[in-house]
Image (cartoon, grey):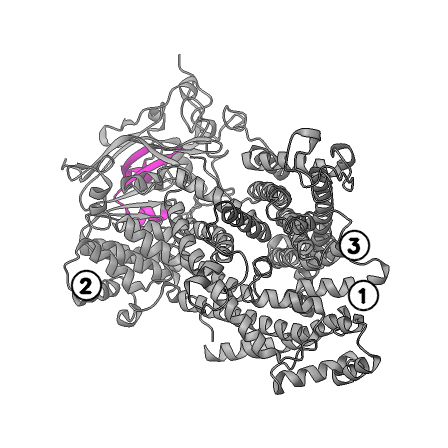
Amino acid sequence: MTEPAPALVDGIPATASFDVTSAEGLELEARSQWSYARQRFLRHRLAMIGLFGLLVVFGAGAFAPWVAPYTFDQIDLLNVLHPPTMAAHHFFGTDEIGRDYLSRTIYGIRTSEQVGLAVAVIASLFGLFVGAVAGFYRGWIDNAIMRITDLVLTLPVLVTLLTVSALLAGSGGGGQWTITFILAGFFWTPIARVVRGVFLSLREKEYVEAARAVGAGDLRIMFRHMLPNTLGPVVVNGTLAVADAIITEAFLSFLGFGIKPPTPSIGSLVAGGQQFPQKWWLTVLPGLVLVVIVVCVNFVGDGLRDALDPQQRRVRA
Amino acid sequence: MPEPMLAIRDLAVEFRTEDGIVHAVDGISYDVFEGETLGIVGESGSGKSVSTLALLGLIPQPPGRIVSGTAMFKGADLLTMKKRELRRFRGDEVAMVFQDPMTSLNPVLKIGFQLCEAIETHYPKEPNDKVKARVIDLLRLVGVPNPETRVNQYPHEFSGGMRQRAMIAMAIANSPSLLIADEPTTALDVTIQAQVLEVLKRVQEETHAATILITHDLGIVAEMCERVLVMYGGKIVEQGDVHTIFQNPRHPYTIGLMDSLPKLTEDEEWLRPIPGQPPSLISRPPGCAFHPRCFLSQGRLPCREQVPELRSIDGGPEHTSACHFAEELIGHHSKFSPGPVPSGGAV
Amino acid sequence: MLTYIARRILYSIPVLVVSSFICFTFVSLAGDPLGDLRANPRTTGGIITHLQHVYHLDRSIPVRYGYWLKDVFTHKFGVSLNTSQPIWPDITRAMGHTVQVILIAQLIALVLGVAVGIFSAIRQYSIFDYTFTTVSFLGYAMPTFWLALLLQILFVDIYLKWHVRIFYTSGLNTHGSATWSLDRLQHIALPVATLSIVSFALYSRFMRASMLDAINTDYVRTARAKGLPERVVIMRHVFRNALIPIVTVSALQFGFLLGGAVVTETIFTLDGMGYYFIQKLGQSDVYAIMGYLMVVAVSIVLFNLIADILYGFLDPRIRYD
């Protein structure tokens, strides 16, 4: 049974008479950019492994008083320099005055994560602000800021650290927060660079002109239109900065210029273990924890980059 | 009817992506005859480029896969021959000109070197100076000024139009029997477009190569091609010689394409785009791929359930259409036909 | 090109001057070069006052900076405040050792890294690719000091258990052997290994990414469409383009490492730039530290320039006029 032919008027066909979009297979699912990104991130296997690892390790650090079998300075002179064992929960062995190494490591993780996360957050916020101003206003502000970042890059971390610590020596300098702020003072530059780059390129885009034509002020343009575009790279860089900050802090503490005992720090643990090269667990195990942290952070960073970078087209083989 | 130089049968290509399998080309068949210019028209995503890339084995195989089909070229099946065999055809018998001349040339190698490379790969025994002389001649043929100097320059020193001319020169360097031009002018300004098309015409006259011209621009098809294929959703929906297609289109999509073009000699109030969106190549609705946007279909059952076959219309095998109700379009004259002018228009 | 180089050098001078002043201020504020002497009960107040005067420590910082600047040009960075030894010979000696170590390490890392990167990219998604990507991922994540210690422990253990000495774990030479002897190689083998592993991880990842970028370009498709054999496509078209970023990165790395791989040299007690720096930092020896910092700053600027020149050399699109 055929249906009647459609009307042709003057040889010109009438237009389609039913709703095209509801025909099967043509429904478009509107998804916001963020939910799309979240979905991609959750599908990224390595990122999930990294996230899980981080939760375990950072969680142990955060809840150290409850998780660690001993406190970090509990001395047991009967059990000096014991290799790792199941007995008495000394899974990481003991050090030269019998302190449980696992507990010391866990407290060290706690310090590391505090420093790492704080540095990343401070550096990201500061870098975001500075980069936005430089990229948006251009001109001499941009120039000045760029020269400052160049200068920061030429300053050696160690020297600056020493100076500031020495200057604050009176008020207990060399403490955790001194290190945090100094490190943040170095880590903001790449983020500022990236944000500035995004702002510079977006500035010329038509929708900024359009917004201005409608009467939007500077701040509104910056916040509403340009900032969201920087969040992707900032989040990725910030995440990777956590790993960098943790390693830098460990390295500084290792050399003796960073966080000094008795505040526990993985770097100083490894440094202390150097005196007993035969007792491998003193140096290897804390460092291993560090490697795990860095690898996990890198996995998560990779996953975030995949999820937030719209240019990526990964085809699963 | 002479033997076709290239006979493609049931070619199907798919791509595996994160979101599913994309059926880029869904079983197409066509012929190319010696010396003719065949146009392939379609929107982005219609599969027009993919079908020709498949011929030369240029589809990256991990995501892509040639599911089925044969492509007989001078007696050999391009789709099933070994890579080494296929390489002998590429750049020699069958050559391709790509869309974007900015990125299609290696930026760190001189133009002359890249052209000589095209020749030396297939004729390694030729002496260097002879090859170089031929390259300079080729550049002159395609209209690059001062070829002797230009031959030692880098791609970024050429303008867009000149780069495309160099690409064409590279493609015809070994006098191919088949030249495939994939949207050669899409990335260029309109005035440069005209020049490059001139070059293509001249090149055809010189080499008598058959040409497949892929484009989404009907104007180019009208100017350059003898026969036309219209593709939609990975399939061929209409095929015929250029006059017939333009004057008596027999597929609603083709008609829609023609109608969406503004015409200077008519007094139109509104432009008439084809409503809706191109189909998703991953989740294909059953039936005809075009039916959701089709003015002719009206939601009729055959359109919704059966994929229409490509069959002859108006008597001859030369004009085919894949529409269940193509007959209803008989008598329809497009606005390009020399028939009666619709009322209200000035001539 | 020459004007470009001259311009770059000219621009870096003010940056160097400003940063040297800031560093000088920092270092001077950070510690007291005479601290050790003061702590020594046998030093009299008279000696301290005398030294303070000779070393201008009783003047303000900008004035001291002025004296230092003068010494830089007239006395080749002057004389160490602690040891009264001229600084320049010390620095050149330390530099020589550092260069030896990092040159070998970088060469190994570069050759291996490039090779692995190329194969990984060509055989993407293969076992080879996954293995090496994972390995370099781990190598990249390992903190240098941990890796160095790990190697040290491994080989100390072996020695002590089996009394076989393959590699030394500290120092540059056993007494009496020459610079280019087997003994020296035995000593620097482990530090070189440490540095190579980390650099290798960086280079192979970079090379792989670079190759993959190049492989997916339109001009590679054109090359294939011309009928070129795959081997030629890879070597002539892909590799040539992918190499450019690697060359610049390695030049930058080299410049950076000239500051001495501080950690590695400390752990293996090698008499190099990094070790020198740490020692002097501990003693707050202002002139020595400044000498080190200036040499490092200049080499970073120099290698940045070299990296840019190489880039312009390899990529004809970049022309500096």
Percent x, y of residue A62:
75, 38
In the image: residue B205, left or right of residue C317: left
Task: Give me the residue at 50% from left, 23% from top.
Answer: A24
Front residue of this view, candidates A264 and B22: A264
Amino acid type of the residue tagged 2 in the rendering? Val
Q: Tell me which numbered mark, 1 or 3, is placed earlier along the sequence.
A: 1
Quadrant of the rendered image containing residue B197: bottom left
Q: Secondary structure at mark 1?
A: helix
Is B221 part of what is drawn in magenta? yes
Image height of C87 relative to B303, above or below: below
Percent x, y of residue A302:
56, 43
Q: Residue furthest front?
A: C163
Percent x, y of residue C311:
45, 66
Amino acid type of the residue tagged 3 in the rendering? Gly
Picture quarter with the N terminus of chain C: bottom left
Amino acid type of the residue tagged 1 in the rendering? Leu
Percent x, y of residue C256:
55, 64
Q: Chain of mark 2?
A: B
Q: CA distance from mark 3 to mark 2?
A: 73 Å
In the image: residue C90, left or right of residue A155: left
Q: Secondary structure at mark 3?
A: loop
Q: Which residue is mark 1?
A: A167
Front residue of this view, candidates B98 and C316: C316
Q: Which residue is mark 2?
A: B131
Q: CA distance from mark 1 to mark 3?
A: 12 Å
Task: Give me the residue at 27% from left, 61% from top.
Answer: B142
Is B218 part of what is drawn in magenta? no
Look at the image and give the residue range highlighted in magenta. B219-248
Q: Which residue is mark 3?
A: A175
